[in-house]
Each structure stands twice: as structure tokens, then as C-alpha cells.
Amino acid sequence: MTGADGVVTLDRVTKTYDGRVTALDDVSLTVADGDLVAVVGASGSGKSTLLHLMGTLDRPTSGTVRVAGQRVDTLGDRALSVLRAQRIGFVFQQSHLADRQTAVRNVETGLLYAGVPRRRREALALEALDTVGLAHRAGHLPHQLSGGERQRVGIARALVTSPAVVLADEPTGALDSVTGAAVVDLFRTLNATGVAIVVITHDQEVAAALPRRVTLRDGHVVSDVTTSPGDDLAGGLPRQVTTSPGDYLGGRGVGRG
Amino acid sequence: MRISVRDLVRIAVGGVTARLTRAALSVLGIAIGVATLVAVTGIPASGQQALLEELSRLGTDLLEVTARPAQGDDVATFPAESVAMAERVGPVTGVSAVANTQASVRRSDVAGESSGVGVAVLAARDDLLGVIDGELAHGRYLDAALDRFPTVVLGSEAARWLGLTRLPDAGPAPQVLIGDRWFAVVGILEPARLVPAIDQSALVGWPAAESYLGFDGRPSVLYVTAQEDAIEDVREVLPATVHPELAGLVSVSRPSDALLAKRQTETTFSGLFVGLAGVALLVGGIGVANTMIVSVLERRGEIGLRRSLGATRGHVRAQFLTEAVLLSGAGGLVGVVLGTAGTVGYALWRGWPVVLPPAAVALGLAGAVAVGVVAGLYPAVRAARLPPTEALATA
């Protein structure tokens, strides 16, 4: 279904705001089926813009974006919404849960716009909660859950439609390091079941724990490094990527586009 | 992707109830407008119904015949035989008469004590009460045994002005001074619904007025009852019948019509009140619009989330529009309940039957919903137009 191009493909994408500020400049990037990608970069490097374009929440100024094989620029609001509802799952820094709804009802919200009949939603939501290890918290309200648990509910909401790709924007940004590490572990587990995941983060530790790391600076991809599954994550990667913030190793990345 | 109405309403209920105090205040604004609308139509309708019931009880077969004074005369009177003439008209079922004696009445001969100013001393025929459908509150009415003696029956207001609201059960009857002669008060009347002039009168017997007050026996007002279906015909012929020479000066009125007209102006709230209800509804609508605009500003994060979950602009617009209609619709329901309670309370207090015009209730509810749609449109369109990235960025 996703075609040979991958789940999300950006081809020479430029995004300019108000005709002056260039957030992304001629970026080409492919997220393949089963990828687990960290997008790192300083504030203003274009990370969020990249995520918005991949998630069809915004349109490029030039270049093409394909999601699940479809060219996004030709689609209208309805078709884009269907794409978001069925093929893309979003996870945000703030979990954006409805305060007065239980965990399972919050997860069901993920199915609301995907055309899933009401009677089937609860079973799917419980299944998604089970996947993130929160089956026992299904009946709890958000204020009865810890920060990490709330974020897991948000992840379950993103997963409940069985999307082709999950886009996570600073998913650990509001969590302490231990809880954040647990969330990263969860992404790795989920990725092992086949779903492609893109994690935007400014946290080098989080990035280091993921097999592929795309580094952005000033709207350009300056590195794209993949560690093969057999590599020692702790030893092999930091040498290449996690240097001082300004010392990006442009040109040494493994081009995938 | 379509979402069901049930889902839409469920989301909207969630959105509205999450901010309960604010929602309640918006509901209250609409409720006041609708309650006003229901009450200003329900209360007059109840009064109207009460009046119709009262009129059907009192009957509408009574005619009052009066005359303007002829040139050179101070007072207008009918010929003494006018009563007998009127009785000869076929459909006429009863005729009675009173005559103003121009005498004054006082409670005592001590100056300054309870005044009878404003009380008309009327010579009244013994059959007056039957013809005008009057009732006694105390004592007895004039009859053949009393009407030649100095006795008087007081109308309800006249009795109050003279300080005689009831008669002693035993002992001598109270006396009032009419002209220069003492008259015994033998009875007090209930208010005469159709002929309020009687309320402000002191009634003395026809022969007694002739004996003691220099009355010439010429009636000044005739009361005629006739078969209902012939009442207009009777009305036509009466002037020439009772006053053949000066028929042009005679006017015949139907007291039930006068009562109806008077009460209608009393109980029909003018368009002003309906306008007031409209203004209240408008202000309520502005309240709903304001609540929704604030809600859209506060819930940008939620809007962004829903867009990321696949909500179209249409879904977002429908959600906020539904919330506005929910607020105003709830206001409409509460308003109907309040307006009904107000109408029932007022009607019970006045002893009226309760009438709630279904049109007013329907209009109130429909108006509330319409106000909700109009008030919700702008905030809903704004919410829908919010770019998802912007909504998420400000969350």
C-alpha cells in the first residue's frame, strides 16, 4: 500500500513563511515502512515544520510530499483529513487528553473521525491501551494518571487506527528522564511490530536510542545516519552525531532519498 | 468521512459541560428571553380566557339605553312610559330603569364626616337586580314592601365610601342622610360586573324617590335584556321605541362589549413587551456568541488535536455550531419552563384559567435555536478556519 517510495516521502520540499522566513530548504527525505527515525536539531532548525508537512497539517511552498503513496498537494481538506484519520497517528508533547473522559474514551477519540462505527471503538481502544501496557488504567481519568501514563494514553490514541506512520513531536519533552526512557522503549517495541515512527526531539539521549537519526540545521538536512540493528547503540552512534550543538557532520549522513 | 449526529452531540455536550458555570450563564441569558416571550403571551391569553368565561357567565344579552340632554334641558330623561314601551318589543325579555334624583347622600348631619361625595342617588325599579344580573352582598334589595319607604340599597363602592362595608346582624339598620331625610340602609350590593355605575350609587325605591326626593318619575337609564340572536335588531329599534320624539339623542350600548374592550387593553400586553422579549433573546444570543468565541480561543489545542485526528474543517465547524445550539436550545427549554411557571403562578393568583399558546412555546424554542445558530456561526467558522499548525503551536 505504501509503495516503493516509503510511508512518507519528501521530495525537494521547501517551506517559506510569509515569503521571507525559510523553515525548510530543499529537503528530500524518505521514511520507509518499519523505520524508527529521530529528527534532531536546535530550536528553529525546521523540525516542527518537517513534522507538520509529513503529517499533512501544512502544505509545502514547493516540492512534493507523499504519504502512503498519495501526493498530498493534490488533495483537498476532506481527503487530507481522511489520510490523517486513517494513515497517520500523532503524539504531542502535551498529551491533549480530555480531562473529563476516561483513558479508554480518550483513545476512542482517535477513531471518531476514521469512520469506525461506535460499537467497535471500545474494543479497539482497549486493545490499543493493552499495547501500551495500560489495560488496567482504562477506566481512569487523566488526573488519576501519571505524566508517563498520560503520554502512553496519547500514544494509544495515535495507534488505535493502526496507522502507517506515527509522528511524535517532543513526546518526552514534558517527562522526566526515566519516564521519557520508558516511552522511548515503548516506541522501539511498537516499531518492532512494523509501524513506522518519526520522533522529533531535541534530546540527544532520546535520539541516540533510535536506529536512524536525521539532523536538521537551518532548514537543511545535515546528516542522516542509520545504525544497523546489530550495532552497539551506546558505543557506535554518539561518536558520529552527538557532538557539540554546532558541530554537525554534514555530508557524512547516509542518504536515503 | 462523516460522523454521526449522535457522536456530534456527544462531543458538543462534552464541550459545553466542561465549562459548566459559563454554560449556565449563557443558558440563563437565552432562558430569560424565552421566558419573557412565553409569559407575555401566556398571561394575556389566560386573562382573555378568564374574561370569556366571565362573559359567558354574565351573559351578553344586556343593553344599556341612555340619552343626551335635549337643547335647553340640564338632564336627559326618557318619557315615564318608556319602560312599558320597551317591554312591548318582541324579543325583549326584561326591562328595568334607574333615574338620577340629583340628591346627595351623607353618612351623618355632622359636616366633614364620611363623605358621600361622588355617590349618585338613583331611583331604581324593584326589578333592576334581575335585569342587570346584580347580586346582594348583605341585607335585602328593594321590593314592593319597601320601595315606598325611606330605605336605600348601596352599591359596593358607595358603601365603602360611606364607611358601611357590612350591615349589623341585629339591631337597627344604619341610616344615611339623603337630601334632608334619613334613609335606612337595608342592603349592600356585590360589584356589578356589567354595570359599574351601579357600584357608585345609592338606590332608593321608585315611589320613595317620588315621595321624598321630588323625583318626577322619568327614567334616565334603561336596562333591557333580549334574546341573544335578536339583540342587534332590538338595539336598532330601541331609540325610536323609548323616545319617539328625540330618538336621535338616544344611544344604546352593550355593556359586555365595553367590558371586553376595557379588559383587553388591561390584559393584552402591547407589542412593547414582545419587543422586550426579543431584546432579551438578542442579548442572550450575544452571550452565547461571546461564550463560544472565548471557547474557541481557549480550545485551540483541542481544535488542533481534532484536526490531527482527522477532523475536517466541516467537523470542527459542526462541533462548535452544535455547542452553540445546545446552549441556546437548553436556554429555550429552561425559558419555556420558567415562562410557564410565571404564567401559571400569575393566572392562579388572579384566579384565571391557565392558557399557554402553543405557538408562543414553539416560537420561543425555535427562536432560541435560531439564535444559537446565528450566534454560533461566526465562532464556528473561526474555529474551522484555524490552521491546524497554528492551533497546535499555541496549545
Image (cartoon, coloured by chain):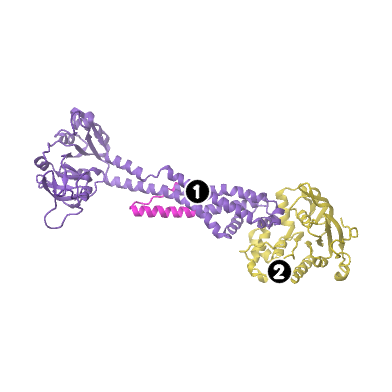
Chain colours: A yellow, B purple
User: Is residue B346 magenta-colored?
Assistant: yes
What x and y, as percent, mark residue B291? 57, 53
Looking at the rendering, the stretch of residues picked out in magenta corresponds to: B332-359
Q: Which chain does the residue under circle 1 lie in? A: B
Residue at disc 2, secondary structure: helix
Q: Which mark is residue B281?
A: 1
Q: Is residue B168 left or right of residue A76?
A: left
User: Is residue B116 magenta-colored?
Assistant: no
- The residue lying furthest to the front in this view is B111
Residue at disc 1, secondary structure: helix
Q: Give the answer, above or below, for where B240 lies relative to B351.
A: above
Q: Give the answer, above or below, for where A115 lies relative to B277.
A: below
Disc 2 marks which amino acid?
Answer: Gly
Disc 1 marks which amino acid?
Answer: Leu
Closer to us: B192 or A84 = B192
What x and y, as percent, mark residue A130? 70, 69
Q: Which chain does the residue under circle 2 lie in? A: A
Q: Tell me, yes or no, whether the two marked residues, 2 and 1, touch with CB atoms within 8 Å.
A: no
Q: Is residue A205 left or right of residue B237?
A: right
Which residue is the site of mark 2? A148
What x and y, as percent, mark residue B95? 19, 39
What x and y, as percent, mark residue B296? 63, 53
Number of dots carrying numbers: 2
Q: Is residue A130 left or right of residue A35?
A: left
Q: Which mark is residue B246?
A: none
Q: Is residue A115 visible?
A: no
Q: Is residue A255 left or right of residue B164?
A: right
